[in-house]
Image (cartoon, rainbow, N blue to C red):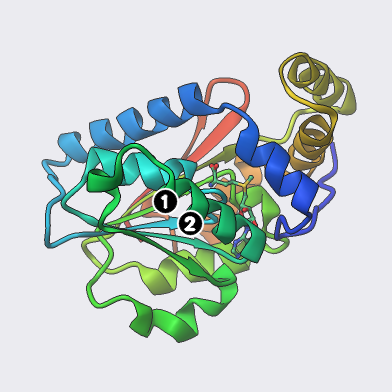
């Protein structure tokens, strides 16, 4: 199936509300456990000296879970959509986990502009994360240039995203499954996201051709891709 890009930022109020109100917690908890597993395997324990950055943080679902898992570590969520950042700030302010979220903050910025704003971070990034971001990015160079410019020799990258289905029929089947759980706006967004997603081959070839072969690209189950490692 050919890739059909979708708008990068999620700015429509209804779209943001639908996304924020949906319960993705099962997958999010799995993602945090998976990151923890990889860090443990590398003997990395995150503490006060570290910085975690969550790119395309949306309403902060993953950022909050990262902050709760590593409460002594500074966590910064970044999103280019003001609506999303407002939601993230609101969710943080109404969370029952205030104590653990005290080192979490949000920045509204397009990931393509962070390079110029690197002064926003006082320390090097230990863990650079994104979930469901890559498919929004029209050109892969923009995503990889950003993570390259933000990474240092200590930075572990962990980026998870949808994998583009093989054909339209499979995409429509996944859309139908989604519609059983989520509302129409979210289901349509999910379908647009599936069509905008990259394939394993596209990501793998990009890393190989752009001096990024230290990054591992692999498939998780039938529907997801992971980019992991050091740049
Ligand atoms: C599908 S949501 C994922 C939100 C969050 N990571 C999660 O897992 O719940 C994708 C988010 O990426 C943001 N985004 C897309 N392109 C971006 C860009 N170029 N710069 C910053 N944020 C971007 C969108 O605004 C949206 O909030």
Q: What residue is disc 1 on?
A: 93
Q: CA distance from mark 2 to mark 1?
A: 6 Å
Looking at the picture, tell me which residue is in the foreground, 22 or 3.
22
| Residue at image location 16% in from the left, 49% down from the top | 46
Classify 85 as above or below 108.
Answer: above
Quarter of the render that holds ligand 1: bottom right
Would you say the residues marked 2 and 1 are in contact, meaning their CB atoms lie under 8 Å apart? yes
Q: Secondary structure at mark 2?
A: helix
Q: Is mark 2 within 8 Å of ligand 1?
A: no
Relative placement, left or right, of 171 versus 201 is right
Q: What residue is disc 2 on?
A: 89
The answer to which quarter of the image holds residue 22 is: top right
Residue 59: percent from left, percent from top: 55, 48
| Residue at image location 57% in from the left, 40% down from the top | 161
Asked whether residue 216 is in view, the answer is no
| Quarter occupied by the C terminus | bottom left
| Residue at image location 12% in from the left, 45% down from the top | 45
Q: Residues within 10 Å of mark 1 (few under 14, many from 20)?
A: few
| Quarter occupied by the N terminus | top right
Q: Secondary structure at mark 1?
A: helix
């Amino acid at each position: 199936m050919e890739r059909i890009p979708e708008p990068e930022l999620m700015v429509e109020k209804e779209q943001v509300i639908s996304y924020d109100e949906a319960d993705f917690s099962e997958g999010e908890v799995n993602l945090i456990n998976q990151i923890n597993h990889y860090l443990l395997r590398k003997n990395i324990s995150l503490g006060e000296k570290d910085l975690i950055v969550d790119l395309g943080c949306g309403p902060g679902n993953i950022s909050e879970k990262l902050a709760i898992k590593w409460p002594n570590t500074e966590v910064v969520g970044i999103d280019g959509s003001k609506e999303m950042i407002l939601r993230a700030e609101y969710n943080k302010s109404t969370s029952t986990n205030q104590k653990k979220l005290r080192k979490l903050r949000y920045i509204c910025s397009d990931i393509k502009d962070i390079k110029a704003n690197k002064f926003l971070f006082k320390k090097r990034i230990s863990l650079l994360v994104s979930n469901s971001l890559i498919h929004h990015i029209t050109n892969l160079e923009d995503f990889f240039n950003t993570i390259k410019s933000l990474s240092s020799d200590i930075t572990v990258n962990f980026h998870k995203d949808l994998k583009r289905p093989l054909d339209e029929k499979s995409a429509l089947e996944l859309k139908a499954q989604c519609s059983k759980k989520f509302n129409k706006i979210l289901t349509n967004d999910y379908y647009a996201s599936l069509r905008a997603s990259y394939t394993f081959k596209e990501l793998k070839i990009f890393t190989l051709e752009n001096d990024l072969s230290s990054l591992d690209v692999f498939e998780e189950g039938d529907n997801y891709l992971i980019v992991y490692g050091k740049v």
